[in-house]
Amino acid sequence: MKVASFVRVLVLALFSLVVSSSGIGNCDPTLGFTEVPLTEANFELQKPYDVPLEQRYIYVNGVHRFWVYADDKPHSITSLTQPRTEARIVGLDYSSGVWQFEGYAFVPNGTSGATVAQIHGAAHGNTTLLLRIYNGDMRYYSMDLIQTDLYDKWFKLNIIHDVDGGKVTVFIDGVQKFQSADKGPADLYFKCGVYGAPMNISYYMESRWRDIKIYKK
Ligand SMILES: *[C@@H]1O[C@H](CO)[C@@H](O)[C@H](O)[C@H]1NC(C)=O
Ligand SMILES: *[C@@H]1O[C@H](CO)[C@@H](O)[C@H](O)[C@H]1NC(C)=O
Ligand SMILES: *[C@@H]1O[C@H](CO)[C@@H](O)[C@H](O)[C@H]1NC(C)=O
């Protein structure tokens, strides 16, 4: 019947309006930002100091694959930190303004206690933000739960660091999932890959990344 189908269309239209205005739908966190072009020279690769890069990292078909083992050495002979295989974005360190990291990430089932992305540097402490995977869930350090059930799937990560406003915001697949005060201006830069947490780390840790982009306002 005509009236019934009109009502159905109306209900569907209202539903999609509610969904899009409630933030359930996707948005583009990069709107209003300008992309900063990256070249290979903007990627500094860090890995256990005593193994060749190709035993912990490979770049094939646009995908960076990083892996590390819990008993690996740190990235330098003098460092006492946990093992890591990470890309550090170089040449784009910042200490003010509004900056954004974007990338598509994949974490295989089994990787746990691994920082997969971070903002290095802070006025207080060494880092502004660590995003860790524990048992498939993403957490802010080992604390706030940001997103569950991330194993074995590609997801889009956006991190906005508003240094002037003193806050960091995390989006998964275009949806805001987390916001926190930052830790003050410093020499700041983005990293991604795998970096062992202090506790509860799996023996094998891996993350894959593609379409890594940096934006600023
Ligand atoms: C991850 O692997 C474990 C062990 O094989 C399995 O029990 C679990 O269901 C897997 N999780 C996902 C999300 O696939
Ligand atoms: C910061 O890093 C240094 C050098 O790796 C380390 O000695 C220190 O304990 C770290 N500080 C914090 C708060 O983690
Ligand atoms: C490590 O795992 C133990 C046991 O599951 C848990 O109680 C503890 O909170 C975890 N610690 C961190 C830092 O995640």
Image (tube, grey):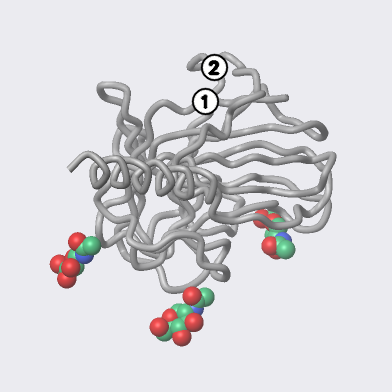
**Looking at numbered disc 1 in the image, what kind of residue is underneath it?**
Lys
Q: Is residue 85 visible in this depiction of the protein?
A: no
* Residue 141 quadrant: bottom right
Q: Are marks 2 and 1 in contact (CB under 8 Å)?
A: yes
How packed mark 2 is, by other alpha carbons closer than 10 Å (few <14, some 14-19, many 20 or more), is some
- Depth check: give the residue in front, 80 or 98: 98
- Front tag of 2 and 1: 1
Q: Is residue 192 above or below residue 177?
A: above
Residue 99 place in picture, x, y as percent: 69, 32
Q: Residue at x 60, y 18 (%)?
A: 35
Q: Is residue 198 above or below residue 169?
A: below
Q: Specify the quarter for ligand 1.
A: bottom left
Q: Residue at x 36, y 48 (%)?
A: 11
Tell whether 137 sits left or right of 130. Answer: left
Q: Secondary structure at mark 2?
A: loop
For the C terminus, the image quarter is top right
Residue 193 place in picture, x, y as percent: 44, 43
Residue 101 place in picture, x, y as percent: 57, 34
The residue beneath circle 1 is: 213
Q: Secondary structure at mark 1?
A: strand
Tell whether 208 sits left or right of 117. Answer: left
Task: Give the total number of marks visible in the rendering.
Answer: 2
For marks 2 and 1, the one nearer the N-term is 2
Q: Residue at x 48, y 49 (%)?
A: 18
Q: Which mark is residue 38?
A: 2
* Residue 154 quadrant: top left
